[in-house]
Amino acid sequence: MSRPLREIWNGEQGPVYRFRLRDGAGVRDMATAAVEFYIEDQDGASYGMRPGVIAGARADGTVDLQLRGRESDWPSTPKDLFVIPKLYYATAPDGTPAVNALLNPSFDTASGTNPTRIATSWSQSGSGGVFDNYANDPAPSVIYGAGTFQLVNNPTGNYLFQNVAATPSIGDIWSFGCWVRGSAISGSQDDFNSIAMSGIGGTQEDIVVRLPVGEFDWRFLRGELVMMQSSHTTMRMSLFAESPHTGSWRFDEAFMFAGRWAVFYADAMRIPVKSRSRIPKASNQLKGIGSFEVDSNADGVSDAWTKLGSGGTFSIEKNPAHVSEGAASQKAVLTDQSEVSLRHVFRGRFRPGDTWRASVMVKTNGALTIGSGTGGFNIVLQTQYFEASPVSSVATNFGTNLATFTEHSTSLAITGAERSELMVDIGLGGVTGTVWIDDVKLERTVEGP
Amino acid sequence: MANLLPEVPGLTARVGESGRLRTILITKENRKEARNLTGWSARVLFWYLDQAPHAVHMATIDPLNGLVKHVDKAGQFTTGERHIFMQAELVPPNWYMNGNVGQAFHVVATDIVTIYVMGAPV
């Protein structure tokens, strides 16, 4: 019998479960642990691994599991899900929780400014091509704290490392680990795309764990080194993401310690998934959301939409003359902004072979003035990165002199792997004037095999 | 009058009605204290048995009281006497980023509320 967790409705998008990790009678400090959750359905089909995201202070032992849309969105009769936690406990040679030898292991403090912002206590072997920035990452953007370390298109010979004073003896065991995710990592697996630990001083010895290539979401990589050389004075952990590889890497929650990882699985837990009435995929999934009716926090942007970029004046328009349908529309007064858009992220199961169509009604106050701002005045539909290679629709530009609400649409054929998120982006860059948008729709026009 | 929800007064409506405020209280896991819904958004779906939702509207949020508030609109109660089902879908702020309001990184659905729709006088 599996312990049941809170049941969910079919199609609840990305529900979150919160756990507290215990170690015997006490709470396990997440400073010395990592958790992965493996997801299966009742028939044993695997949906892969989801990371355990540290939800509060590490010492609280609280961990979040966030399901993706593809795990909780069933086409008809839903299936129960099973969650199997995999626990990694950093364990000292005497069996007690090990102490992480690294400072700033979560990359939450940094010095400098992008693109040469380096995490405190870590060093860069070379220069250029390094910066940290996680703000636009899909959730979970971090495993713990306020930041990750991001490396993009790192040049030759450039890697990040931290040295720790240590004098291990022959036969001593040191271990290390790190959470990693990557996007568009080119090439094949090799030592230039890896995490490594080294015993330095005397004859150097290393353990290298190669990272995947392509697109991969958070995973916990680890290794251990049994000392075969004497006279080490330093233990070093390194993050290699360098030429000839290009791409974008994230690192978080690095561990290095004297001892070994204790690795074991906890009992499986069951998530019952209940049936309910659903909006058919072939009709508008954004009913309510796409009509810009409510602005609960009075920030000028309709609920369920996020404004990306800065500039422009946004408000909810209730003058019926400027509303396409319902009681309100989204008004934007623009002054040639760059990279300003409205985004809605819709979760669900988006299968290869499906084609999805997004549309929007647009009206302008006379002719808009076209400027030099970038980002486009258009509608785009795209998938997220870190899950599979992102695919994007061909942007459909809006007219710039629309006396009445005019529909603009774009379609995206899902290729490759199953996806969990579609982003509907309404680009509002490069024009000056007043525009109203209303009735954004998202619907499946072709169902895959 | 049908009351399919224990300890909940029977919810009723008449065909063609609109304008009535309906509220859904969202509590913490202890089911006693209201959950703070600051930064959340919600939409409300209505459907008849074995049918897809025929009316879906955004709701307003009373964040400190944990309330999802929706005013009945024309088009919700369109046919004769029968049960109608109502469910709210809530979208929290994006805690992982900048707390953006209701950015749909996850959506939670409430229990389903049953409303008995009575015929209207003719």
Image (cartoon, rainbow, N blue to C red):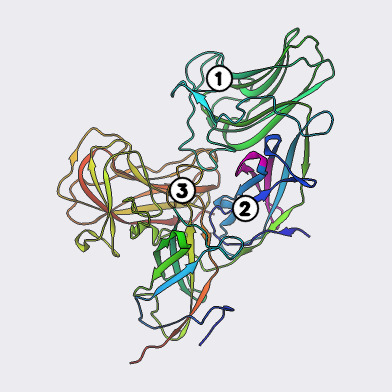
Label 2 Cα crowd, 10 Å radius (few <14 / some 14-19 / many 20+): few
| Side (left or right) of A405 relative to B102 | left
Q: Is residue A152 visible?
A: no
Q: Quadrant of the image for the C terminus of chain B?
A: bottom left
Kindly identify the residue that appears in the image at 47 percent across and 16 percent down: A128
Q: Which mark is residue A242?
A: 1
Kindly identify the residue that appears in the image at 54 percent across and 58 percent down: A12
Of the numbered discs 3 and 2, the one sitting upstream in the chain is 2
Q: Nearer the viewer, mark 1 or mark 2?
A: 2
Q: Which residues are magenta?
A: A35-59
As rendered, which of A268 and A244 lies closer to the eye? Answer: A268
Q: Which mark is residue A422?
A: 3
The lab-note entry on whether marks 3 and 2 share a chain reads yes
Q: Which mark is residue A19?
A: none
Label 3 Cα crowd, 10 Å radius (few <14 / some 14-19 / many 20+): many
What residue is shown with label 2?
A: A17
